[in-house]
Image: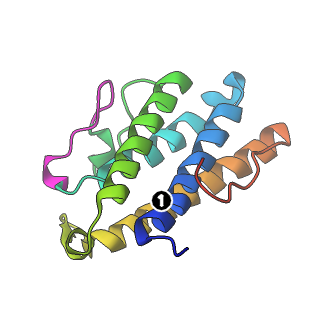
């Protein structure tokens, strides 16, 4: 049986999200808010995951309690440290948003434009870009975990 485009994209994109989740869950609380900013890297990754999954980026609003701080050109940090539980909840929100988008994508949607002030991509390309961004930060978090606790989650081959 031949898998559909939607299934293949979801299996790999979902696996990237699962790897991010595993890294967040493994992080000890004493390492959550150190100078390495494990929490912030996690938040940054989730914010942009959510944003790039929004087909109309001009009207993007993250769910509460999150803000648009990532858009600040001066790199202003959020006004507080987000908890592991808040970020796991945000990850689950993003995971569903990603699954819903990928499951419903048609050739027409995939070829439509995703445009903001800096990018003019097809929806298909922004999906791949987004998946690469998630995987980049998952690897970064895994490296931090290896350096701090000599442990990191394993590879996830396909979405759970």
Left or right of residue 120: residue 2: right
Q: Residue 63 magenta-drawn?
A: yes
The local secondary structure at tag 1 comes to helix
Query: How far from the left and from the top, in percent, is residue 59?
Result: 13, 47
Residue interval drawn in magenta: 57-67
The quarter of the picture where residue 39 lies is top right
Vertical comparison of 33 with 76: above or below: above
Viewer-proximal residue among 38 and 129: 129
Left or right of residue 160: residue 55: left
Left or right of residue 105: residue 135: right
The quarter of the picture where residue 114 lies is bottom left
Q: Quadrant of the N terminus?
A: bottom right
Q: Is residue 36 visible?
A: no
Vertical comparison of 114 with 137: above or below: below
Query: How far from the left and from the top, in percent, is residue 53?
Result: 32, 54
Can you identify the residue that label 1 sits on?
10
């Amino acid at each position: 049986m031949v898998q559909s485009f939607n299934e293949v994209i979801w299996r790999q994109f979902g696996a990237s999200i699962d790897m991010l989740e595993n890294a967040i869950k493994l992080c000890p609380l004493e390492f959550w808010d150190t100078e390495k900013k494990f929490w912030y890297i996690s938040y940054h990754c989730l914010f942009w995951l959510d944003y790039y999954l929004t087909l109309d980026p001009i009207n993007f609003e993250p769910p509460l309690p999150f803000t648009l701080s990532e858009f600040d050109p001066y790199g202003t940090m959020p006004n507080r440290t987000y908890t592991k539980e808040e970020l796991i909840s945000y990850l689950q929100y993003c995971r569903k948003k990603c699954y819903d988008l990928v499951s419903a994508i048609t050739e027409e949607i995939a070829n439509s434009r995703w445009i903001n002030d800096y990018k003019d991509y097809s929806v298909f390309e922004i999906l791949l870009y987004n998946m690469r961004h998630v995987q980049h930060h998952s690897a970064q978090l895994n490296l931090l975990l290896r350096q701090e606790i000599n442990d990191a989650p394993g590879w996830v081959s396909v979405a759970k």
